[in-house]
Image (cartoon, rainbow, N blue to C red):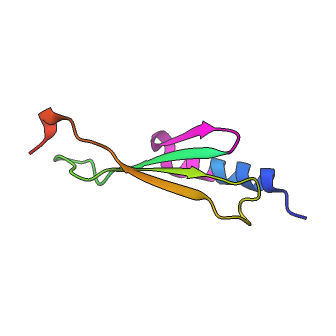
Amino acid sequence: MTDYAEEQTMEVEALESIYMDDFAKVQDSPLSMKVKLVPDQNGGINHVALSLVFTMPAKYPDALPLVRASRMWISNSRRV
C-alpha cells in the first residue's frame, strides 16, 4: 500500500532543498507548488524566465501531476 501523503511530503522537501528561494508551496489541497526558473543571473539581463506550477493529484506519484508553465515578464525599464 502506498502512502501518498508521505511521498508527496518528501517530494516537497526535496524541491525546497533544490530550488530554495525559487520554490513556493501554493496550496495544500490539492497540493500545488511553484518553481521559478531563471537562466544564469551573473552579469547581464535575462531575457528568458519561466515559472512552473505543479498540481499534484491525491494519488501522486501513481497519477501524473498537472504542470502549467508561464513566462515571467521583464519590466519595461529592463527591456532591450
- The answer to which of 68 and 24 lies nearer the viewer is 68
Left or right: 48 in relation to 10: left
Q: Residue furthest left?
A: 80
User: Which residue is found at the position 15% from the left and 38% from the top?
Assistant: 78
The C terminus: image quadrant: top left
Q: Residue furthest right?
A: 1
Image coords of residue 33 (percent x, y) = 57, 45
Q: Quadrant of residue 79?
A: top left
Image coords of residue 14 (percent x, y) = 62, 53
Count of all numbered marks drawn on residues in the image: 0
User: Residue 67 lies in magenta, yes or no?
Assistant: no
Q: Quadrant of residue 59?
A: bottom right
Left or right: 5 in relation to 70: right
Image coords of residue 6 (percent x, y) = 79, 52
- The answer to which of 48 and 18 lies nearer the viewer is 48
Left or right: 79 in relation to 49: left
Left or right: 39 in relation to 45: right
User: Residue 16 lies in magenta, yes or no?
Assistant: yes
Query: Which residues lie in the magenta part?
Result: 14-30
